[in-house]
Amino acid sequence: MSNDLYKNVNQDEGIDNISVTDYLSKFREKLAKKFSILNSEIIITEEDLKVIDQLLEAFKRGYFAQILELNENKHQVLSRIFNSEPILAKLLKQKFIKASEDCKIISRNYPALIQQVAQQEKIEIDKTSAHPKYTFCKGFIMLEIDDREFKARAYTREGNLFIKPFDIQLVVSTIKQEINRIFGRPFNSNQFAKMLYQNYSIIIKKEKKKIGEPIPIRKITTRLGKNKKNFRTDEFIVDFSRLIESETPLIYKIDLDNTKDDRSGILLYQMEAHGYIGFIRMRKEEAKL
Protein backbone atom coordinates (compact mmCIF):
# COMPACT_ATOMS: atom_id res chain seq x y z
CA MET A 1 0.00 0.00 0.00
CA SER A 2 2.87 2.37 0.76
CA ASN A 3 4.18 2.00 -2.79
CA ASP A 4 0.73 2.98 -4.13
CA LEU A 5 0.67 6.12 -1.99
CA TYR A 6 4.12 7.11 -3.15
CA LYS A 7 3.02 6.62 -6.73
CA ASN A 8 -0.06 8.84 -6.23
CA VAL A 9 2.07 11.64 -4.78
CA ASN A 10 4.39 11.61 -7.75
CA GLN A 11 1.43 11.86 -10.12
CA ASP A 12 0.82 15.51 -9.04
CA GLU A 13 1.87 17.60 -12.03
CA GLY A 14 5.04 19.60 -11.51
CA ILE A 15 5.61 18.70 -7.87
CA ASP A 16 9.01 17.18 -8.65
CA ASN A 17 10.11 20.51 -10.10
CA ILE A 18 9.31 22.51 -6.95
CA SER A 19 12.10 23.12 -4.43
CA VAL A 20 10.84 22.51 -0.89
CA THR A 21 13.20 25.17 0.50
CA ASP A 22 11.91 27.77 -1.97
CA TYR A 23 8.33 26.94 -1.10
CA LEU A 24 9.04 27.08 2.64
CA SER A 25 10.85 30.40 2.21
CA LYS A 26 7.90 31.95 0.37
CA PHE A 27 5.45 30.59 2.94
CA ARG A 28 7.65 31.97 5.71
CA GLU A 29 7.58 35.44 4.10
CA LYS A 30 3.79 35.23 4.07
CA LEU A 31 3.68 34.31 7.76
CA ALA A 32 6.24 37.01 8.67
CA LYS A 33 4.16 39.68 6.92
CA LYS A 34 1.05 38.51 8.75
CA PHE A 35 2.93 38.48 12.06
CA SER A 36 4.25 42.02 11.47
CA ILE A 37 0.72 43.31 10.86
CA LEU A 38 -0.64 41.57 13.94
CA ASN A 39 2.31 42.73 16.06
CA SER A 40 1.75 46.34 14.98
CA GLU A 41 -1.89 46.03 15.97
CA ILE A 42 -0.88 44.62 19.36
CA ILE A 43 1.53 47.51 19.98
CA ILE A 44 -1.14 50.08 19.06
CA THR A 45 -3.74 48.33 21.22
CA GLU A 46 -1.32 48.24 24.18
CA GLU A 47 -0.73 52.00 23.81
CA ASP A 48 -4.47 52.65 23.69
CA LEU A 49 -5.10 50.40 26.69
CA LYS A 50 -2.40 52.09 28.77
CA VAL A 51 -3.81 55.57 28.12
CA ILE A 52 -7.36 54.44 28.83
CA ASP A 53 -6.22 52.85 32.11
CA GLN A 54 -4.43 56.06 33.09
CA LEU A 55 -7.49 58.16 32.28
CA LEU A 56 -9.77 55.79 34.15
CA GLU A 57 -7.57 55.96 37.26
CA ALA A 58 -7.32 59.76 37.05
CA PHE A 59 -11.11 60.14 36.79
CA LYS A 60 -11.65 57.76 39.72
CA ARG A 61 -9.22 59.72 41.91
CA GLY A 62 -10.39 63.14 40.75
CA TYR A 63 -6.93 64.07 39.45
CA PHE A 64 -8.07 66.85 37.12
CA ALA A 65 -4.59 68.17 36.31
CA GLN A 66 -3.43 64.67 35.44
CA ILE A 67 -6.42 64.32 33.10
CA LEU A 68 -5.34 67.51 31.31
CA GLU A 69 -1.75 66.30 31.14
CA LEU A 70 -2.85 63.03 29.52
CA ASN A 71 -4.92 64.96 27.00
CA GLU A 72 -1.88 67.07 26.14
CA ASN A 73 0.83 64.41 26.16
CA LYS A 74 -1.18 61.55 24.65
CA HIS A 75 -2.96 63.57 21.97
CA GLN A 76 -1.94 61.24 19.13
CA VAL A 77 -3.20 58.15 20.93
CA LEU A 78 -6.42 59.86 21.94
CA SER A 79 -7.03 61.06 18.38
CA ARG A 80 -6.75 57.48 17.18
CA ILE A 81 -9.19 56.32 19.85
CA PHE A 82 -11.59 59.18 19.07
CA ASN A 83 -11.70 58.21 15.39
CA SER A 84 -12.97 54.76 16.30
CA GLU A 85 -15.10 55.79 19.30
CA PRO A 86 -17.02 59.02 18.49
CA ILE A 87 -19.29 58.79 21.55
CA LEU A 88 -16.31 58.41 23.87
CA ALA A 89 -14.63 61.30 22.05
CA LYS A 90 -17.58 63.59 22.75
CA LEU A 91 -17.75 62.57 26.41
CA LEU A 92 -14.02 63.04 27.02
CA LYS A 93 -13.83 66.39 25.27
CA GLN A 94 -16.55 67.66 27.59
CA LYS A 95 -14.70 66.26 30.60
CA PHE A 96 -11.43 67.88 29.49
CA ILE A 97 -13.14 71.29 29.50
CA LYS A 98 -14.61 70.57 32.94
CA ALA A 99 -11.21 69.41 34.25
CA SER A 100 -9.65 72.70 33.19
CA GLU A 101 -12.32 74.63 35.09
CA ASP A 102 -11.81 72.42 38.16
CA CYS A 103 -8.05 73.05 38.06
CA LYS A 104 -8.63 76.79 38.11
CA ILE A 105 -10.79 76.38 41.21
CA ILE A 106 -8.13 74.22 42.87
CA SER A 107 -5.49 76.80 42.01
CA ARG A 108 -7.41 79.58 43.75
CA ASN A 109 -7.84 77.46 46.87
CA TYR A 110 -4.51 75.63 46.86
CA PRO A 111 -3.12 76.97 50.19
CA ALA A 112 -6.12 75.82 52.22
CA LEU A 113 -6.50 72.53 50.34
CA ILE A 114 -2.87 71.48 50.65
CA GLN A 115 -2.92 72.23 54.38
CA GLN A 116 -6.02 70.08 54.77
CA VAL A 117 -4.61 67.11 52.86
CA ALA A 118 -1.21 67.41 54.55
CA GLN A 119 -2.90 67.17 57.95
CA GLN A 120 -4.81 64.09 56.80
CA GLU A 121 -1.55 62.50 55.64
CA LYS A 122 0.14 63.54 58.91
CA ILE A 123 2.92 65.55 57.32
CA GLU A 124 3.81 69.08 58.37
CA ILE A 125 4.21 72.02 56.03
CA ASP A 126 6.82 74.48 57.30
CA LYS A 127 5.21 77.57 58.80
CA THR A 128 7.39 79.83 56.64
CA SER A 129 5.70 78.45 53.50
CA ALA A 130 3.68 80.78 51.31
CA HIS A 131 1.93 79.92 48.06
CA PRO A 132 3.21 79.11 45.48
CA LYS A 133 6.29 77.89 47.40
CA TYR A 134 6.09 75.37 50.21
CA THR A 135 8.78 73.67 52.23
CA PHE A 136 8.86 70.51 54.34
CA CYS A 137 11.25 69.07 56.92
CA LYS A 138 12.61 72.47 57.93
CA GLY A 139 13.34 73.55 54.39
CA PHE A 140 15.02 70.36 53.19
CA ILE A 141 12.25 69.55 50.68
CA MET A 142 10.85 72.37 48.56
CA LEU A 143 7.68 72.45 46.49
CA GLU A 144 6.73 74.97 43.81
CA ILE A 145 3.25 75.19 42.32
CA ASP A 146 2.69 76.48 38.79
CA ASP A 147 -0.88 77.80 38.80
CA ARG A 148 -0.92 78.43 35.06
CA GLU A 149 0.35 75.06 33.89
CA PHE A 150 -1.20 73.16 36.82
CA LYS A 151 2.17 71.57 37.63
CA ALA A 152 4.04 70.81 40.84
CA ARG A 153 7.82 70.52 41.19
CA ALA A 154 9.42 69.14 44.33
CA TYR A 155 13.16 69.32 44.86
CA THR A 156 16.03 69.50 47.31
CA ARG A 157 19.32 71.34 46.87
CA GLU A 158 20.53 68.18 45.14
CA GLY A 159 17.96 68.36 42.34
CA ASN A 160 14.39 67.51 41.39
CA LEU A 161 12.42 64.89 43.27
CA PHE A 162 9.48 64.99 40.89
CA ILE A 163 7.50 67.09 38.44
CA LYS A 164 3.83 66.12 38.42
CA PRO A 165 0.34 67.45 37.79
CA PHE A 166 -0.57 69.62 40.78
CA ASP A 167 -3.48 67.48 42.00
CA ILE A 168 -3.21 67.90 45.75
CA GLN A 169 -3.67 64.32 46.92
CA LEU A 170 -1.15 63.14 44.33
CA VAL A 171 1.40 65.80 45.33
CA VAL A 172 1.05 65.34 49.09
CA SER A 173 1.18 61.53 48.94
CA THR A 174 4.32 61.69 46.80
CA ILE A 175 5.92 64.23 49.16
CA LYS A 176 5.14 61.82 52.01
CA GLN A 177 6.88 58.99 50.14
CA GLU A 178 9.96 61.18 49.64
CA ILE A 179 10.02 62.16 53.33
CA ASN A 180 9.87 58.50 54.32
CA ARG A 181 12.62 57.63 51.84
CA ILE A 182 14.97 60.35 53.02
CA PHE A 183 14.25 60.44 56.76
CA GLY A 184 12.57 57.13 57.54
CA ARG A 185 15.55 54.84 56.99
CA PRO A 186 17.36 53.13 59.87
CA PHE A 187 20.67 54.76 60.76
CA ASN A 188 23.75 53.40 62.51
CA SER A 189 26.43 56.01 63.15
CA ASN A 190 29.29 53.51 63.43
CA GLN A 191 28.37 51.74 60.20
CA PHE A 192 28.03 55.03 58.34
CA ALA A 193 31.36 56.31 59.71
CA LYS A 194 33.05 53.07 58.66
CA MET A 195 31.61 53.36 55.14
CA LEU A 196 32.71 56.99 54.98
CA TYR A 197 36.25 56.15 56.08
CA GLN A 198 36.55 53.27 53.61
CA ASN A 199 35.67 55.54 50.69
CA TYR A 200 37.85 58.35 52.05
CA SER A 201 40.82 55.93 52.31
CA ILE A 202 40.35 54.63 48.76
CA ILE A 203 40.33 58.15 47.34
CA ILE A 204 43.36 59.17 49.47
CA LYS A 205 45.31 56.15 48.23
CA LYS A 206 44.33 56.74 44.62
CA GLU A 207 45.45 60.37 44.81
CA LYS A 208 48.67 59.39 46.64
CA LYS A 209 47.83 61.49 49.67
CA LYS A 210 48.16 60.73 53.36
CA ILE A 211 45.41 59.82 55.80
CA GLY A 212 44.32 63.02 57.51
CA GLU A 213 44.69 65.19 54.40
CA PRO A 214 41.57 66.88 53.02
CA ILE A 215 39.65 65.71 49.97
CA PRO A 216 36.50 67.25 48.41
CA ILE A 217 33.38 65.81 50.00
CA ARG A 218 31.84 65.55 46.54
CA LYS A 219 34.50 63.01 45.56
CA ILE A 220 33.02 60.65 48.13
CA THR A 221 29.45 61.16 46.91
CA THR A 222 30.60 60.73 43.30
CA ARG A 223 32.32 57.47 44.15
CA LEU A 224 29.29 56.20 46.08
CA GLY A 225 27.07 57.11 43.14
CA LYS A 226 29.16 54.86 40.91
CA ASN A 227 29.59 51.96 43.33
CA LYS A 228 26.58 51.87 45.65
CA LYS A 229 23.27 50.63 44.27
CA ASN A 230 20.39 53.13 44.51
CA PHE A 231 22.65 55.75 46.08
CA ARG A 232 20.96 59.11 46.61
CA THR A 233 22.90 62.21 47.64
CA ASP A 234 20.00 63.65 49.64
CA GLU A 235 19.99 60.50 51.80
CA PHE A 236 23.76 60.78 52.24
CA ILE A 237 23.47 64.40 53.40
CA VAL A 238 20.84 63.52 56.01
CA ASP A 239 22.88 60.57 57.29
CA PHE A 240 26.09 62.60 57.27
CA SER A 241 24.29 65.29 59.28
CA ARG A 242 23.10 62.65 61.74
CA LEU A 243 26.68 61.43 62.09
CA ILE A 244 28.06 64.90 62.80
CA GLU A 245 25.35 65.56 65.38
CA SER A 246 25.67 62.10 66.96
CA GLU A 247 27.18 61.79 70.41
CA THR A 248 28.00 58.12 69.84
CA PRO A 249 31.74 57.44 70.43
CA LEU A 250 33.54 56.72 67.14
CA ILE A 251 36.95 55.35 66.26
CA TYR A 252 37.23 57.96 63.51
CA LYS A 253 38.17 61.60 63.85
CA ILE A 254 36.31 63.73 61.34
CA ASP A 255 37.20 67.32 60.44
CA LEU A 256 35.29 69.43 57.95
CA ASP A 257 36.36 72.50 55.98
CA ASN A 258 34.12 75.06 54.34
CA THR A 259 33.98 76.24 50.77
CA LYS A 260 32.38 79.28 49.16
CA ASP A 261 31.50 77.25 46.08
CA ASP A 262 27.91 76.05 46.54
CA ARG A 263 28.28 73.63 43.62
CA SER A 264 31.17 71.71 45.14
CA GLY A 265 29.97 71.87 48.74
CA ILE A 266 27.03 70.47 50.66
CA LEU A 267 24.83 72.01 53.34
CA LEU A 268 24.33 69.77 56.34
CA TYR A 269 20.73 69.26 57.41
CA GLN A 270 19.72 71.64 60.23
CA MET A 271 23.28 72.97 60.26
CA GLU A 272 22.95 75.20 57.23
CA ALA A 273 24.18 78.20 59.20
CA HIS A 274 27.66 76.64 59.26
CA GLY A 275 27.90 77.16 55.49
CA TYR A 276 28.83 74.83 52.66
CA ILE A 277 31.07 71.91 53.60
CA GLY A 278 33.61 71.42 50.85
CA PHE A 279 36.30 69.14 52.30
CA ILE A 280 36.62 66.27 54.71
CA ARG A 281 39.59 64.93 56.67
CA MET A 282 39.49 61.61 58.54
CA ARG A 283 41.74 59.44 60.63
CA LYS A 284 41.39 56.61 63.10
CA GLU A 285 41.82 57.27 66.78
CA GLU A 286 41.39 55.38 70.01
CA ALA A 287 37.82 54.43 70.81
CA LYS A 288 36.19 56.87 73.19
CA LEU A 289 35.12 55.36 76.51
Image (cartoon, rainbow, N blue to C red):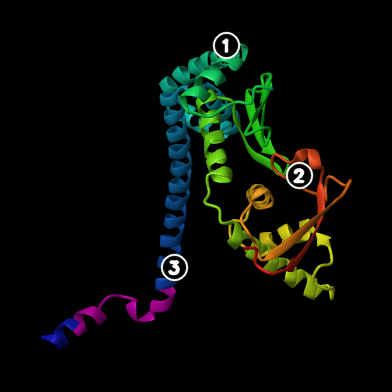
Q: Are marks 3 and 2 in contact (CB under 8 Å)?
A: no
In front: 243, or 107? 243
Q: Which secondary structure lies at badge 2?
A: loop
Picture quarter containing residue 152? Answer: top right
Task: Point out residue 55 in the picture as x, y percentages from the top left corner.
Answer: 46, 29
Q: Earlier in the sequence, mark 3 or mark 1?
A: 3
Q: Residue furthest bottom?
A: 3
Task: Point out residue 247 in the picture as x, y percentages from the top left corner.
Answer: 63, 52
Residue drawn at x 78%, y 75% is: 205
The residue labelled by disc 1 is 105
Q: Which secondary structure lies at badge 3?
A: helix
In the rendered structure, which amino acid carries the disc numbered 1? Ile
The magenta segment is 6-23
Task: Point out residue 36 in the picture as x, y percentages from the top left corner.
Answer: 47, 55
Visible residue check, residue 18: no
Q: Which mark is residue 267?
A: 2
Q: Which mark is residue 144?
A: none
Q: Main secondary structure of the magenta part?
A: helix
Residue drawn at x 44%, y 46% is: 41
Rendered-image quadrant of the N terminus: bottom left
Q: Is residue 11 magenta?
A: yes
The residue labelled by disc 3 is 26
